[in-house]
Image: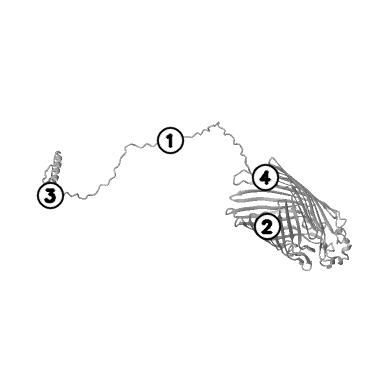
Amino acid sequence: MKTLFRNLLPVALMALTVSAVAQNDDIYNENVIVTGNYKPVLENHQKINVAPTIVDTATKLQHSFNYKINPTRMSSFYEPSRIKAANVIGEPKTRLYNNYVRMGFGNYWTPLLDVFYNSTTSKHLNYGASVSHLSSWGTLGDKDDPVSYYGSNQNSLTSVSAFGKYIYKEKLQFSADLKYQNDYNLYYGFNDSQLDAVGLSRGDISKKDYRACYNFASLNAGVKKIAAGGWGYNAQLNVADLWSTYNRNELNLNVDGSVSHKIKLDQKLQPTAALRLQLSHFWQHFDPETMPLGYDVESGLPTAIDTARGFFVFNPNLSAAIFGFQLHAGLTGAFDYFTDPRDMAFYLFPDLSVTRNFFRETLGLTLGAVGNAAPVSWNAVRLKNPYVQPDAESRLTRHYDFFAQARYSLTRKLQFNLKASYNLWYDYLSFMLSDNYMLNNVFQPKYESFNQWVFRGDVAFVNDEMIAIELGGTYYKGKGLESDTLPGLYHPSFDAHLNIHLNYHDKILVHLQGLVLSKMNAAFSYNPEDYSYETTVTLPMRYGINLEVEYRHSKALSFFLKADNLAFQRYYYWQNYPSPKALFIGGLTYTIH
């Protein structure tokens, strides 16, 4: 029964379908009767894969909008209340000591005294005073050896000074200082053998016969405008007077000022234009009544000097920063009526430099060409060589320097510096023994003109405040401009130095210094037959070791020991003037509460 129902069901469904289609007259109607078993089969056909689309018949409208923004500042009537200053509880102020006294004593009967006073912290006023003295009263050599015995080489240096500075409304700075200095030396550059050669002995002479005593007083006053931008100026007035034995006197009036203006062109450029002016005038007077021991009186006393001389310098310059380069360009002009007061000369010098830093300021390079002029006054001569004759000749020294300099910081603690320069010197101050003194103990100025290559280098290592080491040296290669064979006197060919600073917890301070100075020519002879020069005296190489140690017992009390020339070398810095051997000075520094 179930099988018969399953066979007749499809036939009935087809009959219903054909009957439904037959209702349409346009379709052919045919009845099909199927007998037997029917097996339905679904044939495979291709799928219709078409995505439905919706077509929008509405037209798109393109709109163009024009609009303007008119900002309007809204005023607010709200004012925030002021914040009251907070009370900060900090550490108590560290007490500042405004004075100290340093006293010491050493071999060769060498007393030392320094007294210093300075005002305490102030935003507007700073003033102070100081007194210092250092002298030596020993002798050089063995009395039993007439060649090595030079007798007493007494010398002393005493100075008194006072200074002050006042800042007005944080814009103007007024400063002034007053100084007096007494410098005492002996023309001790002769031994007992030289005295015997001229028929003299130590008992026949007095120290008054060959002493050199210089008194120097100066007054400085200045005003400076403190300004970060715009106009700035600086003016200095200096009056200095030198009077000494053998009736020498030199009065100097010097006025030095500059004005600068920062031009507002670009924030990065920021050029600054400046003009510097200097006028220096000297009055020199010399009335020879007596001369140092050994002067050849048969040749007569030197001519008296009563003259006025000076020079004027102007220096317009411009500084700017462009694309990382620091530029400085200017010219220096000098009117010279110092060398010859009766005839004025004019000189022009370059004032150019360019600096560039690389690799985040690790490497710095500088190229430059600069020049200047400086007067060789009587005061300048005695500061360089106190054993000079009273009637020293004065000239204006000129200098041209073309240089390249490099600075390389390997780390924050290690830095290298190199510099190479080509120098031109005209009327450079040097010295030679005067032929007018039988004891060969008095020098006369010798002015030289030459070109010179200078190569300088140093390396510095700084480890915070604990240790600092500097090692460096300089090599000189020169050639005379007046004559190819004229040897330069007192010109080293090289020098080297080593400085070491140690600071152990601000308790123990150590400073060690080493110095090497090459041999130097000190005298020469001239051969008129072949117009040649030959060096006759050469000073030996100088090497020295200096040491200073300080122990700070407290903030108010410390002890020190100074040792000079630890190599125990009897060197000669000037011909016929031997130095003392090792010098030791010990003492203390005390602050008065």
State left or right for residue 291 relative to residue 366.
Answer: right
- Label 1 packing within 10 angstroms: few (<14), some (14-19), many (20+): few
Q: Give the range drawn in magenta.
A: 497-503
Q: Are marks 3 and 4 in contact (CB under 8 Å)?
A: no
Picture disc at residue 93: 4
Residue highlighted by disc 3: 37
Q: Residue 579 location, x and y as percent?
A: 78, 62
> SS class of the residue under badge 4?
loop
Residue type at mark 2: give it. His
Say whether residue 40 is visible.
yes
Mark 1 against mark 3, which lies toward the viewer? 3
Marks 3 and 4 sit apart, C-alpha to C-alpha, by 120 Å
Q: Give the residue number, with chain letter if any, for mark 2.
A: 501
Measured as percent of width and height from the top left, residue 472 is found at 67, 60
Which badge, 2 or 3, is on the more N-terminal residue?
A: 3
Eye-nearest disc, 3 or 4: 4
Amino acid type assigned to the residue bearing label 3 in the image: Asn
Which residue is the site of mark 1? 65
Q: Where is residue 368 in the image (x, y as percent from the top left)?
A: 65, 54
